[in-house]
Image: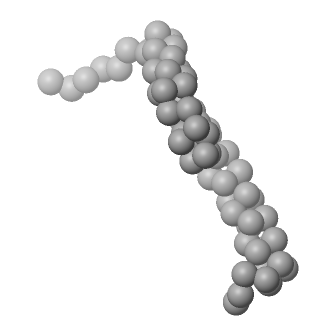
Amino acid sequence: MGCNNGEYWIAKIERNIQRAVEVEGLLQGLGWNVIRFWESDILANCDGIADRLLNLLSQSADTAAPHDVPV
């Protein structure tokens, strides 16, 4: 399959998007928060992405319920 096979690539990208939506829904159903960053955004603004992650983690820690840890 060459790079010029547009139908193949369109179908592949559409399936990747569909799978991402399905997996995100499954993870959210299990109580996970899903955060997605594009590589280009990370490369363009790594410090901003790190700040956003730290902020989200801080918010999450503030609202998390305490867990019983077996001793």
Compared to residue 38, the image places residue 10 above or below, namely: below
Coloration mode: one colour
> Quick one: which residue is furthest to the right in this view?
7
The image quadrant of residue 18 is bottom right
Let me know if residue 1 appears in the view.
Answer: yes
Q: At which x and y percent is residue 44?
A: 58, 38
In the depicted view, which residue is nearer to us: 1 or 46?
A: 46
Q: Taking 63 as reference, is 7 left or right?
A: right
> Quick one: which residue is furthest to the front in this view?
44
In the depicted view, which residue is nearer to us: 20 or 63?
A: 20
Which residue: 66% across, 54% down?
Answer: 20
Q: At which x and y percent is residue 71?
A: 15, 24
Which residue: 48% across, 27% down?
Answer: 47
Compared to residue 48, the image places residue 21 above or below, namely: below
Let me know if residue 60 appears in the view.
Answer: no
Which residue: 73% across, 58% down?
Answer: 17
In the depicted view, which residue is nearer to us: 31 or 16?
A: 16
Q: Taking 29 as reference, is 49 left or right?
A: left
Count of labels in the image: 0
Compared to residue 22, the image places residue 28 above or below, namely: above
Q: At which x and y percent is residue 32?
A: 54, 35
In the depicted view, which residue is nearer to us: 24 or 11?
A: 11
Compared to residue 49, the image places residue 60 above or below, namely: above
Q: At which x and y percent is residue 13?
A: 74, 66
Which residue: 30% across, 20% down?
Answer: 68
> Quick one: which residue is furthest to the top in this view?
62
The quadrant of the picture occupied by the N terminus is: bottom right
Q: Taking 13 as reference, is 45 left or right?
A: left
> Quick one: which residue is furthest to the bottom in this view?
1
